[in-house]
Amino acid sequence: MRVGIFSTKKYTRTFLTAANERHGHELVFFEPRLTVETAALERGFPAWCIFVNDRADTDVLKLLRTGGTRLVALRCAGFNNVDLAAAKELGLTVVRVPAYSPHAVAEHTVGLILALNRKIHRAYARVRDGNLALDGLLGFDLHGRTVGVVGTGRIGTIVARILSGFGCHVLACDPVANEDLEDVVKYVTPQELLGGSDIVTLHCPLTPATHRLIDAAALEQMKEGAMLINTSRGALIDTQAVIAALKSGRLGYLGLDVYEEEADLFFEDLSDQVIRDDVFARLLTFPNVIITGHQAFFTREAMDNIAETTLANVSDFEADRPLANEVTIEMMASQGGV
Ligand code: NAD
């Protein structure tokens, strides 16, 4: 099948090309993101493969459909960037990669916790500058601390197990409790989780119900000086409220791999440009904030799995086989959305 690939980077091409030796599709790589402008440019692709910051809203999907597209294949787990109601109306099938390596994201999450706590980002810069003083680098033992895991699906479950291994007490909230985790976590209400945790880490999907889950009111409920980690989707937190909480000291640490307005920033080398996003620029000024550019998924194992599952999804669609990884508006509704 002829598959156009938006938001191509060198690594996208490498992993998809290698996996395609088993599938034999015609892959055509494009560097730009999917937008109304780029959707109008290219026609004649029955399938388009898109990534986290490609915007498949109603207008874009209409343009793709007019151009002959029947399949939108996400090469990621989250599908908040696709208007599923519009896709259904237009007769477009949407598939994704639900699990490629939850370990990759869980391990990066724990990496952010450890780096923030022990100030490894600051120590690295200091030592390279010949400053071996310890002042300002004081951390705390994770052992014995309480961590709140919001969402115990594939990633949250692994985070809970890793942190339990560190000797942390793990609280969790999820509308669908994971019975296999009950030896490791205590399920509580969101209020109990926020009030009782030294570290809160977000692992739920972005839906209308979880949009800005961590707002000013939620931050007020958190322990003074607690740590907040978000490796899920940027809009789970109200960034302005988080900045206010960092300034007042209510929030002690912030670790982000995602940012609400990341589409205009992430995955690009902007090192010789001025950052025009004042909110993002303000976040970069805090010593107790670490931001990574949506890299939690980025391991060899995850990239192999993403490429293989994406192309297998396309092969299944082409051969009219059942689609194990289809995403539908009904699925979104069952997760508390629309
Ligand atoms: P999953 O579907 O396996 O688990 C999500 C869990 O969140 C489910 O158990 C669900 O019941 C729960 N949930 C839904 N609404 C909730 C709420 N209001 N409060 C608490 N829990 C709620 O998903 P996953 O594979 O674990 O991925 C989690 C998220 O991580 C994805 O939605 C995606 O946005 C993000 N992600 C980020 C990266 C990255 O590179 N940073 C990579 C993959 C996934």
Image: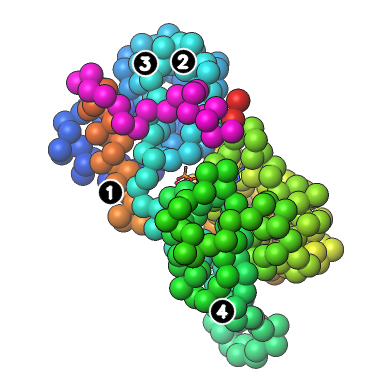
Give the x, y percent position of residue 25: 20, 28
**Colouring chosen for the image of the structure:** rainbow
Q: Quadrant of residue 5?
A: top left
Q: Is residue 9 above or below residue 38?
A: below
**Which residue type carries mark 1?**
Asp
State whether label 1 is within 8 Å of ligand 1.
Answer: no
Secondary element under disc 2, as helix, strand or loop, is helix
Secondary element under disc 1, as helix, strand or loop, is helix
Give the x, y percent position of residue 94: 40, 25
Give the mark nearer the N terminus: 4 vs 2.
2
| Residue designated by label 4 | 143
Give the x, y percent position of residue 134: 65, 89
Question: Is label 3 or label 4 in front?
Answer: 4
| Residue designated by label 3 | 69
Q: CA distance from mark 4 to mark 2?
A: 48 Å
Could you tell me if residue 230 is visible in this image?
no
Secondary element under disc 4, as helix, strand or loop, is loop
Q: Bounds of the magenta span?
A: 319-336
Residue at horizontal 49 percent and vertical 70 percent from the top = 164
Q: CA distance from mark 3 to mark 1?
A: 26 Å
| Residue designated by label 1 | 304
Q: Is residue 81 above or below residue 165?
A: above
Residue at horizontal 30 percent and vertical 55 percent from the top = 301
Taking the image as shown, residue 111 lies to the left or right of residue 195, namely left
